Amino acid sequence: MENIDPPWLKNLLDPSSYPDHPEEVRLIQTHLSWVFIAGEFVYKVKKPVDFGFLDFTTLGKRRFFCDEEIRLNKRLCPDIYLDVVPVNRQEGRFRMEGPGETVEWAVKMKHMPDEGLMSSLVKRDEIEKKDIENICSILSPFYETAKAPPGKVWLGGIDVIRENCRENFRQTKEFAGNVFPMEVFENIKGYTVEFIEKNQPLFEKRQKEGRIVEGHGDLYTANICFDRERDNVYIFDCIEFNERFRYGDIVADVAFLSMDLDFLGLCDLSAYFIEIFKEKTRDQDFFRLLDFYRCYRAYVRGKIGCFTWASAEVDQKTRSTSIEMARRYFQLALRYAGGQEGKPTLFVFMGLSGAGKSTVARAFSEHTGLKCFNSDYVRKRHVCGIPSGERRFEPFGRGIYSRRFTEKTYRALSRLAGERLVLGQSAILDATYIDKQKRDKVRELARSCGARLILVNCTCPEGIALERMRKRMLANDTVSDGRQEIYENQKQLFVPPEQSEADMVIELDTSRSVEEALNSLERLISGK
């Protein structure tokens, strides 16, 4: 896109150009807006662009869509979206809400806490079930009051749905067979066309029942923010620029967030979100439509990734990331379309420190080619941000081994495995899993991803375990900080797994060589 920086841009980077004179002003640019973060407030100015699906090319249109943005977002964030304010010019100087001639319009908002963005909390593994419950408590009454007026119901009807899907396939056909397999394209397209034609009475029923709403339109983790101090949840940035993307079935709206949670590896939270939301809405046809709309949402995200990859303006790193993400979205869409063959398996190697679980898990990973996620590595690198080889000989349950860091570590393990399982890829987890509660959570993850769960409980005589840890300490070449003190505490807390906890529970003796343990494991898995 050509440079369209306006003459007032430089002035609006000056704190003195704002009514409350903030200490500094930061600018964030998107393809649609200039966003000025000025102290306690944020000002968003729309760019004069025309992408077909939106048109901001005149000052009048930009004012109109600023008003729409305020109207729509005040429904969910009345305390955040404040007003539409002018950018004014006087004697060659431009100011926000200043004197003189109005040259532009801006949406004025309160600045939400950056650290509270749901997308950031996901990366920090700080999203829990109570957060999902809070989101549902806001969305459920919102949809009750957002029902489409009679003159707009058609926007959620089968003709618009069919055209939206056709548009997706027209716009991505050139990428099929190049960016992603043609077979995936044809499979998803065939599923979509068949579903629409077979379910015409259902789509018509939804309109008659008042299930078409003026929804959010862009409901995913990047547009949700948590204010932990005030215990508030803000769901922001509704689509204001195109009614076709905003009006639709309630399921179409919530399917976006469910799909996004799946994509991020939070399949268990996605399932919990759907369970809670369906219970609140008492929608009997909810699950008949859910995968169709999740498939649609995933495909649209894949399409956007293709567009970014094909854009000459983006750098190589962005292109590479975009194409990788696009392929994952298309694979996820294929899953919703029922195109994945077989079930993935989540292998969990568990047991006390020194039991040999990491050694056997690593060997099994090398033998099968499956990705293995080790709890010690994840704890240090992903959760605590320290080098994986840095030793931390802290007391049991203290420091980086405190309950808080341990909970985040196990959430991170589930998320990393979930990112693969949801795409039909098997994965390996390597952690103690000494208490049943953590194993129950990993079982919930496997079930929500449609995966088999195999628990491999690694055991050996205590003397062997202690000797292994002693040698590891002397070698100082491992990520593990396991030692006798840790072993003794784990032993007190360890609850052995029962056969009912997984599709298969294997007791694996690791006192033999790695090769013997691996051969034994393969025989037990195959049932031979």
Image: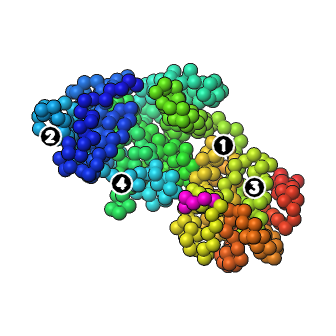
Which residue shows up at 77% across the image and 60% down it? 359
Which residue shows up at 60% across the image and 76% down it? 395
In front: label 2 or label 1 = 2
Q: Earlier in the sequence, mark 1 or mark 3?
A: 3
In front: label 2 or label 3 = 2
Quadrant location, the C terminus: bottom right
User: Badge 4: how crowded within 10 Å, few (<14), some, or many (20+)?
Assistant: few
Q: Is mark 2 in CB contact (under 8 Å) with mark 1?
A: no
To which residue does mark 3 refer?
A: 362
> Residue 154 placed where, x, y %?
36, 29
Q: Amino acid at mark 4?
A: Pro
Q: CA–CA distance between discs 1 and 4?
A: 36 Å
Could you tell me which secondary element the residue under label 2 belongs to? loop
Q: Which residues are magenta?
A: 383-388
Q: Amino acid at mark 1?
A: Gly
Q: CA–CA distance between discs 4 and 2?
A: 27 Å
To which residue does mark 1 refer?
A: 424
Quadrant location, the N terminus: top left
To which residue does mark 2 refer?
A: 98
In front: label 4 or label 2 = 2
Q: Earlier in the sequence, mark 1 or mark 4?
A: 4
User: Badge 1: how crowded within 10 Å, few (<14), some, or many (20+)?
Assistant: many
Q: Is residue 503 visible?
A: no
Which residue shows up at 60% across the image and 61% down it? 379
Could you tell me which secondary element the residue under label 3 belongs to? helix
Q: Is residue 464 visible?
A: yes
Position of residue 370 in the picture relative to residue 69 (left or right) = right
